[in-house]
Amino acid sequence: MEKTGSSQALSRAVFLVPAGIAMLAGVNAALTLVGVDAPVEAARTGDLHGMLMVGGFLGTLIALERAVALRHRLGFAAPLLLGLGGIALLTPLPIMVGKLLLFDGAIAFAAVYAALFRRSHDDVVIVEFLGAVCLAIGAFLWLRVEVPWLLAWLVGFVVLTICAERVELARLHMPPTGGRTLVLHSGALTITLVMTLLWPDLGARLTGLVIVSLVVWLVRHDVARKTIRANGLPRFSAASLLAGYFWLFLAAMTWVIGGAQLGGNLYDLVVHSTMLGFAISMVMAHAPVILPAVLRRPLPYRPIMWVPLVLMHVGLLIRILAGDLGQLYTVWQAGSVINIVALLLFFVVAFGSSLAGPVARRPRAKAPAGQTHPRGVPSSPSSSTAAPHRSVS
């Protein structure tokens, strides 16, 4: 049985290879876009940066996690196609090959959610399905138009997918009607996204309003507001979550006030507040919970994880406040490089933490029989031998 589990973990880890390559290529392209010398000089990767990061990297990671949840071999077609799409974009093959693979992978991704919904009839899965549909529509539009014209659909994919997974992980702390509220928001968001194709400014403003409403609802009900006062992993996850909500709120308000953005400083603000400030922050928050379920290897929390998290948000503050809003180009470059370092550092830290294994805990001193704990609870054999309760912050 253990051998079977190890072989399953290894086969699943294979899907992380194209996701990792897409991320590294996307980071390389990001350096080129900000005017910094990149390790690899490639002419067209700058134009592919957005889809490499959203479709090839994030899409593959999330599709792999959902394929594991489906527990059916066909489910792995989604991360396979998305990963191959990202790889194909980096080869001498016609760029259309990579685009079509990403589109096919997004369709397969939506099919995975459809199968999961048939199994559970869960409202949250409907929202995740709509998120995959957003990715599919974005990939389809990319066959004909440039990324700025389909940005809203990529934002829709990231927002619906991550918010739904957040509600799913923290379901015990959400109101009973949480799933239904999320479905209503996702339906409204889908309508406003369609409007961005017909009336870009109006559609972007309404999309921003829906996202603002969603963020306010999530912050109001998320247990992160309480666990931020805890210690260890709960506090780290809560800080990541609340910071992510802040950046998503900022991006949404930029749409509400400024309308559609197809380039310039405000476009950069929307893109990186969403894709870095929100999406990557949520990845950091949930990685210690989700990745062990996927790879069957622990990813224990260690205090050093705060370093890339803090770097990420400090870099974003510099990039957006001084760079995008203050129009200080050199400072904008510096903030962008800090973001790249933070992203790479987090995965280095996560990999090292996983290899190092579980953190050794100091044994608690056993209180004499009948003595009470500081909160006045009498000590007993059951208090020291009860199984730990695993909670998601």
Image (cartoon, rainbow, N blue to C red):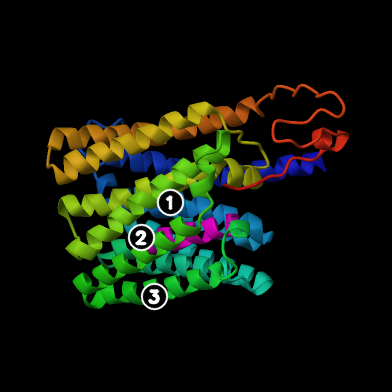
Q: Nearer the viewer, mark 2 or mark 3?
A: 3
Indicate the amino acid at tag 3: Ala
**Residue 201 visible in this rendered orientation of the protein:** yes
Indicate the amino acid at tag 2: Val
Residue nearest the observer in this picture, 171 or 297? 171
Please name the residue that numbered disc 1 is placed on: 56
The label shown at residue 188 is 3
Crowd band around label 1 with a 10 angstrom C-alpha radius: few (<14), some (14–19), many (20+): many
For mark 1, give the secondary structure. Answer: helix
Quarter of the N terminus within the rendering:
top right
Crowd band around label 3 with a 10 angstrom C-alpha radius: few (<14), some (14–19), many (20+): some
* Above or below: residue 328 compared with residue 122: above
* Above or below: residue 61 compared with residue 97: above
Q: Is residue 249 left or right of residue 322?
A: right
Q: Is residue 201 left or right of residue 10?
A: left
First of labels 1, 2 by sequence position: 1
Please check the rendered image and state whether residue 160 is part of the magenta-colored stretch, yes or no.
Answer: yes
Please check the rendered image and state whether residue 340 is part of the magenta-colored stretch, yes or no.
Answer: no
